[in-house]
Amino acid sequence: MSDISAGNHASAHVGTLAGSIAGDLSIAVLIPCYNEASTIGDVVHGFREVLPTARVYVYDNNSTDGTALKAMLAGAEVMRERRQGKGHVVRRMFADIDADIYVMADGDGTYSPKDAEELIRILLTERSDMVVGTRRGVHDDAGRQGHAAGNRLFNILYRSIFGRDFTDIFSGYRAFSRRFVKSFPAVSGGFEIETEMSVHASQLKLPVTEIELDYGRRPEGSHSKLSTYRDGAKILWMFAMLMKETRPFAFFGAISSVFMATSLVFMAPVLVSYFETGLVDRMPTWVFSLVLMVLSFLMFTAGLILDSVSRARAEQLRIHYMSLPLQSRTPPSPSGEIFIEPLARRGGKSAA
């Protein structure tokens, strides 16, 4: 068999296998992009070859290098999101696109489209709501040592605060169920969006799965958009805000402990002097320590109250998640066009 014939046979086998796994379910491949003209064409071609029945969407985020044109020529459906930041793009994608299975990947070519079929297979066979492709070798090619150290630090911090559901919270290669996508609020604006996804899944105790995948190197001419310190600070701030929203008792309890410890430090010498002389000879210090102690009790009380509010909010989110259908109500027609049920069949009156 010639090389060309072998390649066509392999492509047909992959497409057939992907189709047999997904059945009649509609698949959407979502690719957020910012200045990825050197790689986006190959990425789109790769997904169209592996998942021939899927619709590939590229959301251009104000690129200036012709990314949108390259994606369109490769066969993707190109949209534009003017708000700068990956979080804004993901929020727009999840709101716009209706499908049964969603695959999200980056447009820089570091994730192999061939792994998409495995992500979908795991999503369906494990009945998961999110499958994360953890990056094998990410610390060897994280761009800079600061990126690699940040990856390790934030993953350890995540597991200590939110649980041990994930080992790579920054992976951009994921598959989602429809219920996950349509119940995810997506409030962050930048690269913190992956962290928010992970916390959402952990808070609602959704079924999630991780599989280890190869992580490629960026080709020459393609550059990382991450800033070690600026984006690291944004992610750290997102950690704090998500902890405040999802674990308020732990968040405000930690602040309460700091206020109490500081109060006791200032209070101790005043109390020692009082028991020795019967006098409070450092009144300003004593008043300051009492103020800190009052603040400590206020923070503790706020944590208790907000913990109940957070639990009620999580219950409402869970109920909303459970109310969503597993499959879209209007699946795409075999021709690939959006199927619109005739008005008469929906109980409405025809124009005639």
Image (cartoon, grey):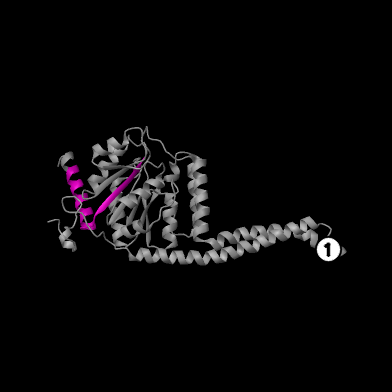
- Horizontal and vertical percent position of residue 287: 75, 58
Residue that numbered label 1 is attached to: 274
What residue is rendered at 36% in x and 63% in y? 321
For the image, the number of numbered tags is 1
Front-lying residue, 306 or 124: 306
Front-lying residue, 230 or 119: 230
Q: Which contiguous range is marked in magenta? A: 6-33
What residue is rendered at 84% in x and 58% in y? 281
- Horizontal and vertical percent position of residue 121: 28, 57
- Horizontal and vertical percent position of residue 352: 12, 56
What residue is rendered at 17% in x and 43% in y? 8
- The amino acid beneath tag 1 is Tyr
Q: Residue furthest left?
A: 352
Dot 1: within a 10 Å radius of its alpha carbon, few (fewer than 14), some, or many (20 or more) residues?
some
Residue 113 visible in the shown view: yes
> Is residue 126 left or right of 342 when viewed as pictured?
right
Front-lying residue, 294 or 170: 294
Quadrant (top left, top right, bottom left, bottom right) of the N terminus: top left
Q: Is residue 326 magenta?
A: no
Vertical position of residue 69 compared to residue 188: above or below: above
Examine the residues drawn in magenta and state their main secondary structure. helix
Q: Is residue 23 magenta?
A: yes
**Under tag 1, what secondary structure?**
helix
What residue is rendered at 77% in x and 56% in y? 285
Vertical position of residue 341 compared to residue 82: above or below: below
Vertical position of residue 215 compared to residue 346: above or below: above
